[in-house]
Image (spheres, rainbow, N blue to C red):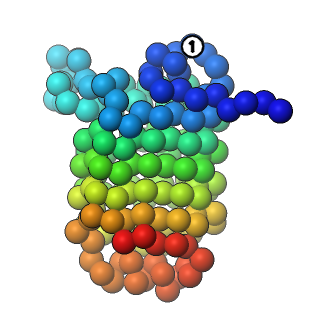
Amino acid sequence: MTSRVVARSLRDVARGQRVQALLLARSQDLICKNLMCEHVGSSCACKLSLVLERVPELREMDLSGNQLRFLPVSTFALTQLTTLNVAQNHLDVLSPEIAALTNLETLDVSHNRLQELPVDVLSALPKLSQLTVTGNPLADDDVARLQALRRDIQIIE
C-alpha cells in the first residue's frame, strides 16, 4: 500500500514527488515578494499558479485563510481533486471553470465574500456531496435552487 504524499509548503512540492495533498492553510509561502506584482506583501495566486502545474495528481488542497481574491486558472486543471478548502479568503466569485473538477466531493467556500453561487455549474458536478457556504452574503434563492437540483448534496450554511 502506497502512503499519501503531503506537501505543507511550496518547497515540498519542488522536491518532485507525486504530491496528493497540498495543505497551505494560512501559508506564508503565498505572500507575494515580486515587486512588479500588484499584490506584493499580501497573498497572491501567482506563486500558487506555477506550483499547481507541477501537481496534476493532487487530490486534496487546503488554501484556507490566505486572503486570496481569486483562484488561479491552473486550479481547474486538477481533475483528480476530491477536496478543495478555500474558506476564509476574499473570494467574490466562484468561477464557472470549477465545472472541470469532476471528481470534487467536498468544497468549502465558507467565510468569503460570495454573493452568488454558480448553481448550474455546482449541480452538474457529479461527485459533489458536501458544500460549505457559511459566512457568505449569499442570496437565499441560490442555496434553495441548488438543493432543489441536487438533494444529495449536503449544504452547510
The x, y position of residue 137, in whole percent, is 22, 68
As rendered, which of 78 and 138 lies closer to the eye? 138
The x, y position of residue 65, in whole percent, is 31, 42
As rendered, which of 8 and 96 lies closer to the eye? 8
Residue occupying the point 24% across, 49% down: 90
> In screen coordinates, is 118 left or right of 91?
right
As rendered, which of 116 and 85 lies closer to the eye? 85
**Residue 68 in view in this figure:** no
How crowded pointer 1 is (Cα within 10 Å; few <14, some 14-19, many 20+) is rated as: few
Residue occupying the point 16% across, 29% down: 38
The x, y position of residue 108, in whole percent, is 43, 56
The quadrant of the picture occupied by the N terminus is top right
**Residue 14 in view in this figure:** yes
The x, y position of residue 125, in whole percent, is 57, 64
> In screen coordinates, is 111 left or right of 11?
left
Question: To which residue does mark 1 refer?
Answer: 15
Q: Quadrant of residue 67?
A: top left
| Amino acid tagged 1 | Arg
